[in-house]
Image: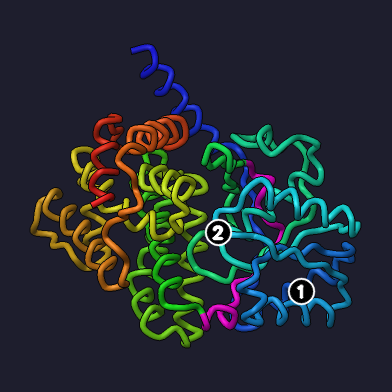
């Protein structure tokens, strides 16, 4: 009873904080070649040498080189750190920080998906905060303004270019440790569809489901507001209208930009409304087994929605109507189940696996314990699950 009372009070405090703490937004450039506009804007700021934070596949694809040419044209010196891996660890952030200091950089430019952007956020925070990453993890622990930070997302999923969070893994115990602070929002970001047209269908699918999960969990959150509902609704409409098209043929700049905007809107929504069990479960799968975050979210979302039916049917019913799977003549439960079917059908259409055999039965109790703990102390979900219920979800995911 005492634990429940403390938890309830904590969730109310988070709700108040989300409404009164000012959350900045990046100056946004969007559309074809908006990355060039961003580079020109950085050049006007006369910041100094930049540390580019990215990954090797983007270098090999020529995407990083395209941005680097724009930086050179704008008269900006830079050095590249391309050691970021999926689900970045403390080690990669510290390597990037060491290069930043060695080269006497004055700002950070992230190029990539959620992993490079999150890693760049941690590097920028470490530049000015003389604390370990472990001590920066948590809520509002980035006391000093990070180094100037800019972002060019090359996927449409995480929304990290607009969020207050950076997720990084502590590798020894396979734990993801989020840093959450308004100071982590980049100064500027560019949503450039020309950098996304070569994304493989599998990456398009995974990142698109990540954006969908952000929007859905934000919409179902107990901390949802009229503002966050508007952003979540906009994101869902764009995903519904463009994700399959991007998956089947991603050459359309319009479709790619629509998905980038969907990711951006979903990021705005969950930054204030927060997330839920799908993300808590996905974080455990990513940290323990290296499961790509979007895939883990796609796997968990329908199971979490089904477990949340008793408390979230009316809200899910609205999502069914929004995605053209519901009927106003049906009751809320029927519409809610129709929306869950929509999510499953979308998952199948995108060629995403339905189970994750990598899950080990002996790991499930600890995975469930960590997912429940993460949710209970971070996410204002509409329906709280017991550890046993969470274990059942992991068992279903194992197949």
Does residue 227 appear anywhere in the picture?
no
Is the C-beta separation of discs 1 and 2 under 8 Å? no
- Which of the image's four quarters has the N terminus? top left
Q: Secondary structure at mark 1?
A: helix
Residue at left offset 21%, top offset 47%:
306
Q: Which residues are magenta?
A: 181-198
Instruction: Estimate the x, y position of residue 229 in percent, counting from the top left.
Output: 39, 52
Q: In the image as oriented, which residue stretches furthest toward the top?
A: 2
Q: Which residue is mark 1?
A: 39
Residue 82, located in which quarter of the rendered image?
bottom right
Mark 1 Cα within 10 Å, few/some/many (few <14, many 20+)? many
- Which numbered dot is residue 222? none
Q: State the mark number for residue 86.
A: 2
Q: Earlier in the sequence, mark 1 or mark 2?
A: 1
Q: Nearer the viewer, residue 75 or 78?
A: 78
Which colour scheme appears in the figure? Answer: rainbow
Find residue 235 and report its horizontal and vertical position in percent.
Answer: 41, 63
Name the residue at 35% across, 68% down.
Answer: 237
Front residue of 281/5: it is: 281
Q: Is residue 149 above or below residue 373?
A: below
- Circle nearer the viewer, 1 or 2: 2
Is 125 displayed left or right of 347 in the figure? right
Rate crowding at label 2 as few (under 14), some (14 to 19) or many (20 or more) other CA atoms within 10 Å: some
Residue 374 falls in image quadrant: top left
Q: Would you say residue 95 is visible in this rendering? A: yes
Q: Secondary structure at mark 2?
A: loop
């Amino acid at each position: 009873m005492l634990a429940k009372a403390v938890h309830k009070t904590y969730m109310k405090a988070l709700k108040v904080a989300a409404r009164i703490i000012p959350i900045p937004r990046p100056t946004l450039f969007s559309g074809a070649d908006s990355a060039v506009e961003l580079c020109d804007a950085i050049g006007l700021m006369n910041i100094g040498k930049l540390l580019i934070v990215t990954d090797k596949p983007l270098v090999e694809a020529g995407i990083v080189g395209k941005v680097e040419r724009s930086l050179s044209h704008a008269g900006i010196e830079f050095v590249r750190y391309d050691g970021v891996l999926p689900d970045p660890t403390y080690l990669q952030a510290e390597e990037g920080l060491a290069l930043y200091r060695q080269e006497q950089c004055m700002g950070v430019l992230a190029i990539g998906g959620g992993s490079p952007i999150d890693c760049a956020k941690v590097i920028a925070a470490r530049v000015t905060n003389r604390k370990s990453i472990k001590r920066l993890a948590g809520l509002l622990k980035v006391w000093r303004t990070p180094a100037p930070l800019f972002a060019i997302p090359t996927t449409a999923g995480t929304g990290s270019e607009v969020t207050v969070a950076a997720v990084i893994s502590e590798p020894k115990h396979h734990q993801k440790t989020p840093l959450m602070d308004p100071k982590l929002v980049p100064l500027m970001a560019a949503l450039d569809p020309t950098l996304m047209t070569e994304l493989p269908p599998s990456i398009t699918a995974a990142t698109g489901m990540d954006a969908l999960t952000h929007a859905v969990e934000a919409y179902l959150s107990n901390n949802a507001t009229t503002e966050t509902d508007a952003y979540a609704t906009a994101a869902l409409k764009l995903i519904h209208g463009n994700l399959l098209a991007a998956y089947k043929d991603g050459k359309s700049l319009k479709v790619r930009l629509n998905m980038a905007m969907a990711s951006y809107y979903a990021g705005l929504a969950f930054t204030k409304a927060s997330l839920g069990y799908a993300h808590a479960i996905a974080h455990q799968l990513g940290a323990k087994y290296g499961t790509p975050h979007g895939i883990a979210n796609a796997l968990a979302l329908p199971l979490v929605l089904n477990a949340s039916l008793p408390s979230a049917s009316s809200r899910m019913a609205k999502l069914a109507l929004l995605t053209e799977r519901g009927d106003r003549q049906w009751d809320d439960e029927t519409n809610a189940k129709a929306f869950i079917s929509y999510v499953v059908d979308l998952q199948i259409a995108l060629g995403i696996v339905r189970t994750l055999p990598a899950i080990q039965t002996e790991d499930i109790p600890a995975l469930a314990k960590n997912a429940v703990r993460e949710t209970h102390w971070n996410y204002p979900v509409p329906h709280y699950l017991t550890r046993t219920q969470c274990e059942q979800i992991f068992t279903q995911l194992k197949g």
